[in-house]
Amino acid sequence: MNFKKNLKFFLTVVVLSATTAVRAEKHAFSPLDLVTFNRISSHSISPNYEYILYDVSKYNAKDNKKELGLYITNLKNNSTVQLTSKHSDFSPFWLNDKTIGFLSTRSGSSQLWYSTLDFDNLDLIKENKLKQLTKLTTSINNIEYNQKAKRLLFSAQAYLNGTLVNDDTYVEQEDNKYTTGIVYDKLFIRHWDTFLKPSVREQLFVLDLRSKNNKFSLKHQPVNIMNGNELESPVSPFGDSGDFSISPDGQTIAFSSRIEEHSQAWKTNTDVFLVKYPIDGKPSAVENLTKSNPGYDNYPNISPDGQWIAYLEMREENYESDKNRVMLYNIKRKTHTELPLRWDRSPESLTWSADSNSIYLTAYSKGRVKVYVVNLKEALIIIKKKGTIPTLAVKELIGTGNNDTIEVIPKRKLGNNSGEIIVFEVIVSEPEEFYFKGHNDELIHGWYLKPVNFDESKKYPLAFLIHGGPQGSWNEGFSSGWNVQSYAGAGYAVAAINFHGSTGFGQEFVKAVSKNWGGDSYNDLMKGLDYVLKTHNTLINLKIILSEYEFGGVPWDKKAKKIYDKWNPREFVKNWKTPTLVIHGGKDYRLTESEGIATFTALQRLGVKSKFLYYPDENHWVLKPANTLFWQTQIIEWIDSFTK
């Protein structure tokens, strides 16, 4: 594995628009690099397969400004051009071979804009060449476009009667517009980082377009395809355009939604639904395709031939880390079939091949995200043996990855010429994989990194990192949050263990942490620490810092009282002696701020050296670039004060 190659690929995919090359000072990877690296999100391949369109986020730490603009790369000669700047333009797609559509907040709320490109003279698009297509009363949040039907499927906030929310006139209490009170008669009240609006849902709408000479207009007002049902799609808080799919002829729509029922706040059940919507007709009634399954059904994807809906299914009720099965629904026959993959991995996403004969899957596997392909008539094979491919889009087969492109197509890096290229000479550490005998002598996987600029004559402190979830894992790839290179760049040896409960090592391994939070996983961590200290005893100085995030806790339930008491850290507060930095977000409604405040209070009462870093505007994660930079810097400064 080559993280230097990894970073080089990541950085040269995205270039800045100017005329000269600039070389940054060579330095060890730092928290500043973490927040200022350019980042690609949405991407779309042109209908003629000649161009790839994508959005790029850039952050300037000096003035705390973030820009989200559009770029285009010619797949024949790898030339890259920035198309938009100084605004927030995102989620690009192709209306046809010459015209691009995208979402933009340049007029206020997020609306649909478009522009016809001059491929003989690609450059920043002039403002008078950008056309606003929608002027809805609320923002468009997620989109999928069908070129054949000229049909746009999108999500937006809607009232319970199905009409679009009006952001300018919305009040929760129509009979008393001056009150700030909100009345709830069922759960959720708040979820993740948001207090919900009882009278509002995120729902799906259809807009049909007409065009002439590359000029587009709306044929009608948005049509809500959920027919007044209190369904929600995408499913909050993490749902996106992967929660819905439109057929090749544009007349069949599949989507996932949480079930509107009394128990929805403590159930994991979501279902896949289907709606038929003929061109120039009316949408059919919503049909629930998976109501017999009590678990999590999601990621519906209609095949290019329009015959199948592939989706992922969890079967165990109230278990969000259950194994995903790949299911096929035959639209004509109304039958469900599970693909007999005979493997112990849990796919994270799926995408059809262009001929509808195969499905590409991404799945965590032994510290990586790998790509698999299953031929519907044959067997599952892996097509990406090395590196990580976190997202995948199929035309011919193109993915965005952290190492190199998928091995079944010619390898090419996209867009490393044209314009001002900032060459980040960032020095990173080369990760090493290792295995050791953990709980019950089972082989446990881990990563080890030497400090950047390692000197064999010196000894270094160890940063021992514990991943969250706890059903998560340390994987090869670039993380904008907990990045192991931040510690290696600060002069620490780094160890990261994939203990019992980690994903990518089989479902039984994942389940081992349930109701056993301080058992097998704790034993793995302690044995892993011993292994690292013994294996690298000549370079580690026994100054060890522990960095843990989001490991999780124990649910309150009368039946779980013994388990709760067994693992509850409250029972061991009197033994706390280790200096501790506590970090908490005020909008974290999963683990409320009182948890962090109570922890800090106990440490202070005990006289243990401690700090409390509080973000009133962050949730379970620290997401704003300036906050991320401060967070990472505070961590490094804190651990440095005890180890250097």
Image (tube, grey):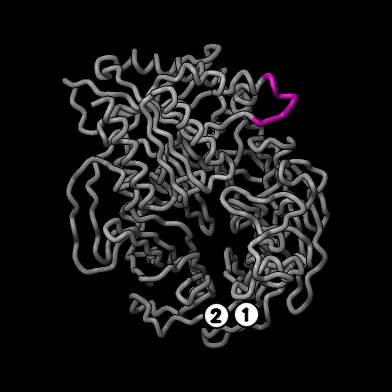
Decide which of 461, 360 is in the foreground and name it.
461
Residue 257 x/y as whole percent: 71, 54
Residues marked 1 and 2 touching at CB (< 8 Å)? yes
**Position of residue 618 in the picture relative to residue 425 (left or right):** right
**Position of residue 629 in the picture relative to residue 618 (left or right):** left
The disc labelled 2 sits on which kind of residue? Answer: Leu
Residue count near mark 2 (Cα–Cα under 10 Å), binned few <14, some 14–19, many ≥20: some
User: In this picture, is 223 found above or below 492?
Assistant: below
Q: Residue at x 30, y 36 (%)?
A: 636
Residue 215 x/y as whole percent: 53, 85
Which secondary structure dominates the residues rendered in magenta? helix
- Residue for badge 1: 209
Can you tell which of label 1 and label 2 is closer to the viewer? 2
The disc labelled 1 sits on which kind of residue? Answer: Leu
Distance in Å between CA atoms under marks 1 and 2: 10 Å
Helix, strand or loop status at disc 1: strand
* Quadrant into which the C terminus falls: top left
Q: Residue at x 57, y 64 (%)?
A: 141
Range drawn in magenta:
555-562
Residue 470 x/y as whole percent: 55, 31
Q: Residue furthest bottom?
A: 213
Decide which of 70, 169 is in the foreground and name it.
169
Q: Residue at x 39, y 22 (%)?
A: 578
Residue 61 x/y as whole percent: 29, 56
Magenta-colored stretch includes residue 323: no
Question: Which disc number belongs to residue 133?
Answer: 2
User: In this picture, is 122 found above or below 319?
Assistant: below
